[in-house]
Image: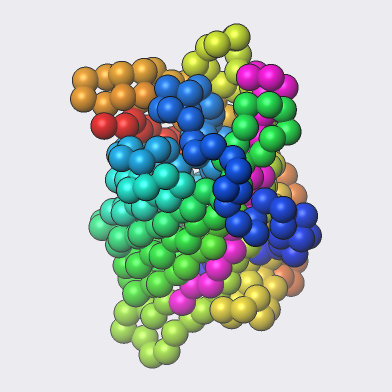
Amino acid sequence: MNRAVVALVASMTIAAPPLAMAADPARPLPAPAGAEAAGPDDGYGFLDGTGVGNAGDRGVTVESTARFGKLDGRYLGINSKLEAAWTPVNRIQVAVAVWSSYHAIRNNTVPGYPDQNRAGFDGLAGQVRYMLRERGTAPFDPGFTVGLELRWARFSEGLAVPAERFAATLKFALDAALVGDRLYGAINVNLGPGTEHPRGLPGHVSDSAIEVGGALAWRVSEGGSTFVGANLRYVAAYGGAFFNQWAGHAVFVGPTVFHRFGDAGPLKDTFVSLAWNAQVWGRAAGAATGNLDLVNHERHQLRVKIGGAF
């Protein structure tokens, strides 16, 4: 089962205390919307930036993630969400999302992946993010944001098997300008448990996950609206709600592209973000798929995100 991702996070949280202990009252509140629009908060591909907007900001995004390729046969899973976000006060952002999914699985010998060709509504999610520290414009003046996402899903993670699934993800995001207004970097750590009850079967199955990733985003031209970059992510999967039994891990690497279009009809600061990651190394418990983890994860992942403010 594709459970989510796991790794060690203690070193990250130890390294971040001066950022994460409390909001710095001496720092100014977030800059006006025009200044925030210049940054690449949505331009880190599979990772998040730290921006949460300014009080009163509202936005909408459509995001789809396609995962394809297992050991053999055919495997394609697409999870999409329509998300609306609102910043009621400075530093706090709340969001709600509607999910859908599509799976096409055939002749796959990886255990636990029955043949499926199914699409449908896949639940709801809610998220709260709090910006502990605003990202500065000077190099290495980082921002730091924490968030909590709760999700209810109607299908087993990755399998398309009908199930009632509940998951919680605690998110840490840090980003900073690295070279003037041209090169930015981000680090994310996500972790949390999940549990699901396959319909028609007794009992529940629990899992837990951590994902640690880094990203770079380079502005192509001075003052321009296009960024290119790269992601490096370590993901792992565990059985049990508290990382009880290691199930597998993998490393993903790939390029990102982000472009801000500006205003489009009723939407402001519209953008598109593209990211492709390939699994370059991994291992499943029992070495079931060699030097890649093709039990819990896929060979390739592709993400497309489109959004704007209103």
Q: Residue furthest front?
A: 26
Task: Provide residue 215's location: percent of width, then percent of height.
Answer: 66, 37
Asked whether residue 290 appears in the rendered view, the answer is: no
Asked whether residue 214 appears in the rendered view, the answer is: yes
Within the image, what quadrant is residue 294 found in? Answer: bottom right
Task: Provide residue 250's location: percent of width, then percent of height.
Answer: 69, 55
Quadrant in which the C terminus appears? top left
Color scheme of the displayed model? rainbow
Instruction: Tell whether position 188 is magenta.
Output: yes
Task: Provide residue 80's location: percent of width, then percent of height.
Answer: 36, 47
Instruction: Tell whether position 124 is magenta.
Output: no
Instruction: Tell me if 279 is positioned left or right of 260 in this view.
Output: right
Q: Residue furthest bottom?
A: 202
Instruction: Tell me if 15 is positioned left or right of 123 in this view.
Output: right
Figure check: 209 above or below 98 = below
Task: Provide residue 145's location: percent of width, then percent of height.
Answer: 56, 49
Main SS of the magenta segment?
strand
Residue at 35% from the left image edge and 66% from the top image edge: 153
Figure check: 225 above or below 174 = above
Instruction: Tell me if 81 is positioned left or right of 3 in this view.
Output: left
**Viewer-proximal residue among 109 and 112:** 112
Write down the region rendered in magenta. Answer: 174-195
Figure check: 154 above or below 187 = below
Residue at 40% from the left image edge and 38% from the top image edge: 54
Instruction: Tell me if 7 is positioned left or right of 164 in this view.
Output: right
